[in-house]
Amino acid sequence: MVGAGLGVLKLMRGVRQLELHRLILALIIFCLLSMAFLAYYVSNSPKIKEAPPLPFSDCGGGGGMSQGASAAEAGGGPGVQRAPLFLPPRQGRLRQVKAVDNSRTEPVVLVFVESIYSQLGQEIVAILESSRFRYRTEIAPGKGDMPTLTERNRGRYTLIIYENVLKYVNLDAWNRDLLDKYCAEYGVGVIGFFKANENSLLSAQLKGFPLFLHSHLGLRDYRINPNAPLLYITKPNQVEQGSLPGDDWTIFQSNHSTYEPVLLASTKSSEALPHVGPSPLRALHATVVQDLGLHDGIQRVLFGNNLNYWLHKLVFVDAIAYLTGKRLCLSLDRYILVDVDDIFVGKEGTRMKVSDVEALLNTQSKMRALVPNFTFNLGFSGKFYHTGTDEEDRGDDMLLQHRMDFWWFPHMWSHMQPHLFHNVSVLAEQMRLNKIFAQEHGIPTDMGYAVAPHHSGVYPVHSQLYEAWKSVWSIKVTSTEEYPHLRPARYRRGFIHNGIQVLPRQTCGLFTHTIFYNEYPGGSKELDKSIRGGELFLTVLLNPISIFMTHLSNYGNDRLGLYTFESLVKFVQCWTNLKLQTLPPVHLAEKYFQTFPEERDPLWQNPCHDKRHKDIWSKEKTCDRLPKFLVIGPQKTGTTALHSFLSLHPAITSSFPSPTTFEEIQFFSGSNYDNGIDWYMDFFPFPSNVSTDFMFEKSANYFDTEAAPKRAAALLPRAKILAVLINPSDRAYSWYQHQRAHQDPAALNNTFHAVVTAGPSAPRDMLALQRRCLNPGAYAAHLERWLQHYQPSQLHIVDGALLRSNPALVMEGIQRFLGVTPVLNYTQALMYDDSKGFWCQRMEGGRVKCLGKSKGRKYPEMNPESRAFLAEYYREHNMELLHLLNRLGQPLPSWLRQELQSTSWS
């Protein structure tokens, strides 16, 4: 019995242990399931977030005020009286100021920088470039020669800017006198900056001026003096509340009537400043002053800091306008268009709901009171309609219910990148699906504007996209951020291709992932900083027309799109006199190219030199089909013979012949350029070995075509350049005979001497022939233009006379210049043909293969009168060529040495 009892106890103990183990296991499983459920809930459920941020409500406080500051603290708002500014109007004094007249100067700014790497110098240049103002930078000379300031009784510069004003005031007496006389005579103003450093005195007089500088100050509460004459864009009577960044500010003091404060601030401390002298509590001190020219006849604007602070950039733009008599100045009109990409596209949780659409409509209504005609422009891909949550799908429906309240433009039906489609028909079919969707849902289809997903196919150009857009949507306008490159944004430009106007598109700091205010990259202060005087504000300030890219997700969740643009518009209207307005895309394009007609013609870049461009370029295309060198001419110097000799080399391949211009493509020099680089590359084969194969093209009119060097360098920056030069007198005569052979009436009806000596009153066709005879022979001028875009090491001058007499020797030098292998023995490859009078290809059996009948024509010798006239005409041009070749270290052609030796001025 006892044994049985023990057995029962052991059994019960074992059951209890087993139940305990099971209980522990169950608890572990329960904990794991709870954790998994919690993780799933956190990652997939909507975030519990604060209400969307409110846009700026008034002008009080500017960028220095927190969103919770009151109107009273800001010095503004209803019922609050602003403190008066420091100065009453002094119209009697201002009437003495001479109106700026620098009409005898070129509209170019001369910028003296401390170094090519200095930050302030780069910021000055960035503003000039953004405004499309021409400029030249020079390292500021403390001593030494001043750049040439005049040319033919005209000033070369309309404005002088010194990054460091001390370099200006401390110029040696000779250069200072030279510069001041130039400024006084030509009405040229000066802008200077003084940025205190550890070596700066606390107080000093500016050398040669009745003006004192007091440095290393901390300031607050920035004000604009409404009496400053330079104010144009800047709106006065605003107060930027709060401390200014840093304690290295400089203020200006003077009793002379020539100085008018522009920006003023109070010191951070109410204590008297020993180096400034006694001043009343919260006295205002000038940090930017305008010199009205009453002291020495030269108007200036001086800044007591750099351009880091946003208000300085605004006043700097006004200073440029004022000191150039508004010659370098944009109008007050600013056109903005806000594109909302990816309508109906986006994953669940990021799309617009009914309340978001209501907010979109409400904000659009409020914006129209501030910006005439303001309308959100919605870009759609119909395939993704109703692919969100039920709540988001109702948001889709509400957008369509109010479709006539917005403007609309198409993306692709499936939001695919157009450059992935190589067949125009397939690409057009994708567009038709989107158009059918639009027609079924009543979306307007006649806006004439479209945007490609990820800007694919717009630039670099995918010709199939342009064709499909025109055939399906009758597109007239598109926009991209990629031309010529995404960064820096100030270089973005427009162009026209295949009848479609391409406008530059601007980013605004809002991307598909920026949907929550408190999660903005770098913090919400970064977004507010961009709006309040930062990058977004400067985009509007410096661009007369801005198309902004935003996304559907920016209008759901925290609605950052609404916050950003309502705040931006209010900030612009608080601080500037700019007139904001909106136009539909087609009208916007008309306005853009009226303002910037020089941008109509594109400048094709090499897609392989920009990773972003390569990513949105067809994989079927390759930059390996672009040439490694060019034969640029000029015409009638032996370029066709050189082309034939080069083509004999086993590693050198010429372009395919053109049906209209034969061995010449003439891409960079005329209307063929409008066809784009796809058309150009079709003239070249796929190389069998990229590293050893040398493809080239010869177009002899590249040499003297003004646009050719810039165009060629944009697409082929690493190419080598061959130019063939003969005596320019012989070249002119050869061209005349060439035109006679082609039955040009001007050549048939006039002697060569009559053509080259014709005066300006001669018939138009005769003068046209004269230009083509004479102008290409100004060799140095044309070569200098090529050297503005190519390094001297990329240029090889071929002696055309030597090419005719000893081509093997010339070809040996060309092979060395190109670095081509193997080296071909042209002594064996060529043979002189007595009947033709020039060298030809040696064939088997002692036969020769020569150029056609049009080459090597026989015609009478040039008469002595014409040769004497041309020798005198080209004398200076040949001297310039001599100096250029000596500078480049290139040997003188034999004909040039002979020409110099035969004249008394050699």
Image: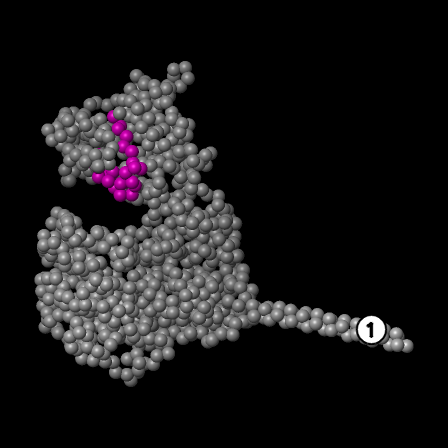
Q: Residue at x 34, y 49 (%)?
A: 602
Q: Position of residue 401 (x, y in %)?
A: 49, 70
Residue positioned 24% across, 76% down in the render = 269
Which is more toward the observer, 728 or 182? 182
Q: Quadrant of the C terminus?
A: top left
Displayed quadrant of residue 579:
bottom left
Residue 406 location in percent, x, y?
43, 67
Q: Is 244 on the left or on the right of 849, as rendered? A: left
The residue nearer to you, when weighing 838 against 650, is 650
Nearer-the-camera pick, 802 or 397: 802
Q: Which residue is mark 1?
A: 11
Question: What residue is rendered at 33% in x and 26% in y?
Answer: 812
Q: Amino acid at mark 1?
A: Leu
Position of residue 801 relative to residue 448, above or below, is above
840 on left or right of 749: right
Residue 32: name its quadrant: bottom right
Q: Quadrant of the N terminus?
A: bottom right
Numbered range of the magenta stretch: 777-801
Q: Is residue 787 magenta?
A: yes
Prevailing SS of the magenta stretch:
helix
Decide whether residue 181 is among the magenta residues: no
Asked which colour scheme the image uses, the reply is one colour
Q: Could one spot residue 372 in this view of the protein?
A: no
- Residue at the (16%, 62%) spot, across then down: 300
